[in-house]
């Protein structure tokens, strides 16, 4: 591995740094964007049962806020349970936007890495080409310098694509996951509002 890095020259270090960041972000988002963690499937039923038995309490709101993004959305709506349906929906929408922003955290960075990695690879290719042309002199080409320049050009191009392709795949996957979770949380929140205002049975 070190031999490849040495053959690729100093431009490869930018791509190595980008790959380490990308792997860290991918692992983080895989752990954080789990459906059970974001929108627990039984949370609406649990809230409905507690509403019927005890009503809204500070303890219930605190527990919801600490539980999950969906819990925070429910808590925002239940804080305005005595207000009109429109006010309750508005507070839920505000909490929903905040939750979606939280879910999208780091995705811009991952998308940026996916976009710039081929450009970093191209930069390494250009550096390699400069070394190749710089090796030409009156006596002809130096084979060692020529080979080194070609190594820099090819390794950087390949490594740039190796970093970019998985980063883009995971970026698209996480974006779709965030959109899916946002829709699911919105539907659950609407059900809660309708239950509270008697338009739907739990």
Image (spheres, rainbow, N blue to C red):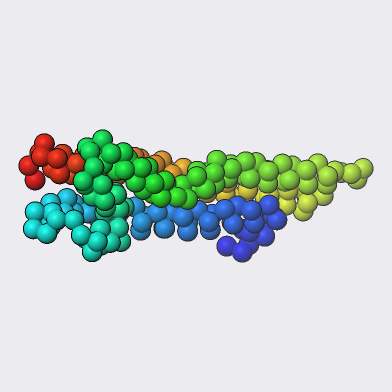
> Which quadrant holds residue 52?
bottom left
Q: Say left or right for 94 vs 116.
A: left
Residue 115 at x, y percent in the picture: 55, 40
Q: Which residue is at a point 28% across and 39% down the rendered structure image?
A: 87
Query: Residue 197: x, y in percent?
Result: 14, 40
Count the numbered circles shown: 0
In the rendered view, does 25 fall on the left or right side of 184?
Answer: right
Considering only vertical position in the picture, is 186 above or below 39?
above
Image-based side of 155 in relation to 93, left or right? right
Quadrant in the picture for the N terminus? bottom right
* Residue at figure coordinates x 58%, y 45% from the top left: 117
View extreme (right): residue: 138
Quarter of the image that includes the C terminus: top left
Query: Which percent across, then down, holds residue 153?
Result: 67, 45
Res. 109 in view: yes
- Taking depth in this image into account, of 32 and 8 the one nearest to the observer is 32
Of residues 143 and 155, which is closer to you in this image?
Answer: 155
Locate residue 94, reporting x and y percent. 36, 42
Q: Nearer the viewer, residue 27 or 148?
A: 27
- Identified at 13% across, 42% down, the residue is 195
- Whether residue 35 is visible: no
Which residue is painted at 35% across and 58% down in the image? 31
């Amino acid at each position: 591995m070190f031999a490849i890095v040495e053959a690729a020259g100093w431009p490869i270090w930018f791509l190595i740094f980008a790959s380490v960041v990308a792997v860290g972000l991918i692992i983080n988002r895989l752990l954080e964007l789990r459906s059970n963690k974001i929108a627990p499937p039984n949370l609406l039923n649990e809230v409905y049962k507690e509403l019927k038995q005890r009503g809204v309490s500070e303890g219930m709101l605190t527990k919801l806020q600490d539980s999950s993004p969906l819990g925070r959305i429910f808590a925002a709506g239940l804080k305005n349970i005595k207000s009109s349906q429109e006010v309750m929906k508005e507070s839920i929408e505000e909490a929903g936007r905040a939750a979606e922003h939280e879910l999208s955290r780091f995705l811009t960075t991952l998308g940026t890495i996916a976009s710039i990695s081929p450009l970093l690879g191209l930069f390494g290719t250009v550096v390699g080409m400069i070394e190749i042309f710089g090796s030409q002199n009156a006596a002809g080409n130096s084979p060692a310098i020529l080979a080194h320049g070609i190594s820099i050009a090819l390794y950087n191009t390949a490594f740039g694509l190796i970093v970019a392709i998985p980063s883009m795949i995971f970026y698209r996957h996480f974006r779709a996951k965030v959109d899916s979770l946002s829709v699911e949380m919105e539907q659950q929140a609407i059900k809660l509002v309708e239950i509270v205002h008697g338009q739907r049975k739990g």
